[in-house]
Amino acid sequence: MAFDGIEELFWPTFAVSPRAKVVSLNWRTWQQYEKSRSTFSWDLTFALHLYSLLLSPVHLLPWSVILLPILELLFDNSVHKFLSSGGPPFTFVGSVPVTYFRYNAVNRRWMTHMAGGLEHSPA
């Protein structure tokens, strides 16, 4: 079990299983942890902002009309092949065009359907 963020549960859990083997991965001092966290936070924030600049405008403008044909050309029609063959599942495919298409499809079709109140069947 990992107790990241819920360290106060370690001793009660250990008390009910006293013969359990414990592996402690506490190898950094607080100062080292803080330095790592502050550096990573800036990198993560920058990456998320860059990612949102690419994907968030999908909700406002039809970027897929422009981007998907270019991605299809660059990546050997991977979205067309994916949709024509019916698989593999989205979670097993990691190409840029298929991931971008999935993002578009989920947000434009499924989320619109869910948010529109159409997900509930009449009782």
Image: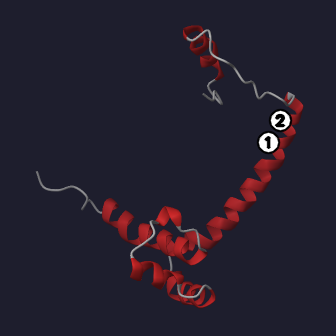
* Mark carried by residue 9: none
Give the secondary structure at mark 1.
Answer: helix
Distance of label 2 from label 1 (alpha carbons): 6 Å
Q: How is the image coloured?
A: secondary structure
* Mark carried by residue 37: 1
The residue that mark 2 highlights is: 33
Tell me the residue at 47%/83% (across/down). 81
- Position of residue 31 in the picture relative to residue 110 (left or right): right
Q: Is residue 40 above or below residue 26?
A: below
Residue 57, located in which quarter of the rendered image? bottom right
Q: Are marks 2 and 1 in contact (CB under 8 Å)?
A: yes
How many residues crowd around disc 2 within 10 Å: few (fewer than 14), some, or many (20 or more)? few
- Position of residue 107 in the picture relative to residue 43 (left or right): left
- Position of residue 79 in the picture relative to residue 24 (left or right): left
Residue 31, located in which quarter of the rendered image? top right
Give the secondary structure at mark 2.
Answer: helix
**Residue 50 location (% of width, % of height):** 70, 67
Tell me the residue at 46%/85% (across/down). 80
The amino acid type, in three-letter code, at marker 1 is Arg
Residue 7, located in which quarter of the rendered image? top right
> Closest to the observer: 50 or 86?
86
